[in-house]
Image: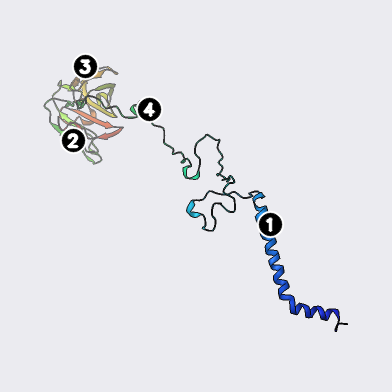
Amino acid sequence: MQNGTFRQRLVAFLEDKGFYIILGLCVLAIGVSGYVLFFTGTEQKVSAPILAQRDDDVPESVSGSIAGIPEDRPQTVLQPEYDHEETGEDRTPSKRPAAPVYEPAKESAAQEAAEKPAVPSTVQVSAPAVVKQPVFALPVRESEIIRPYSGGELIADETMGDWRTHNGVDFQCDEGDEVLAVLAGSVERVFTDVMQGNCVLIDHGAGLKSLTCGLAATDGIKEGASVSAGQTIGRAGNTMATESALPCHVHLEMTENGLLIDPMTILKNN
């Protein structure tokens, strides 16, 4: 009868022979794994895409096959897919079609010609417009001024015996002398005033009007008639009651836009 219990004998056996048992099991496992890999590896399907490699990228340890695939077995190389229809052209990544470049449509020759300014074949230079200066005339030919325009200044009035403004210019003349229109225009009024005598009011346009007073007669001038500068509109007669103390003369007043102005600012160069 052997000494010790079964447990004690098993422990003693494993301590003596355990290393060899473990080594044998490892060898057996390696053998089984090699058998399985060698005899069943060619029947497994390729589950992942195999990309083409260059010859110089294949490891030296692999001879005649790629990643364990025998040389005599057709190799499947998956190409990248595209979202376009197949046209038969080479669609490898290195030859992928370039993106289209947008070019604006060229305008037609007719449009370009229409947008370009027309260049005249000959340059025409028009002559400068001639601006006619208005013609002015003194109310009496070869006359002298015996009392000027005073504006807002008061002056002594011999006839009325007081100080007052003089709103026109008095031109000395003889009775019966011709009285002329100082500027072309249209006769607005022909009237007789107790203090100013016989008068002719002419509208010259542009807001300018003239009033000639102290006439003996108006020589048939009618309202609405057109007159030119220097045309006779009456005869001198010294009929102004407010200036009867002065020698025979013609009294001329002028307004611009309704405001009195000095007639000589217009007539001084005539």
Residue 49 is situated, as x and y percent measured from the top left of the image, at 59, 48
Residue type at the position of mark 1: Val
Nearest the viewer among 11 and 201 is 11
- The residue at which mark 4 appears reads as 108
Q: Are marks 1 and 3 in contact (CB under 8 Å)?
A: no
Callout 4 crowding tier (Cα within 10 Å): few <14, some 14–19, many ≥20? few
Numbered circle sitting on residue 36: 1
Q: Are marks 2 and 4 in contact (CB under 8 Å)?
A: no
Residue 269 is situated, as x and y percent measured from the top left of the image, at 15, 32
Residue type at the position of mark 3: Asp
Q: Are marks 3 and 4 in contact (CB under 8 Å)?
A: no
Mark nearest the camera among 4 and 1 is 1
Q: Residue at x 67, y 54 (%)?
A: 39
Nearest the viewer among 71 and 95 is 71
Left or right? Give the position of 209 relative to 235. right
Q: Tell me the SS state at disc 4.
A: loop
Q: Quadrant of the N terminus?
A: bottom right
Residue type at the position of mark 2: Pro
Instruction: Give the colour scheme of this rendering.
Output: rainbow
Left or right? Give the position of 185 relative to 81. left
Q: Residue at x 25, y 18 (%)?
A: 226
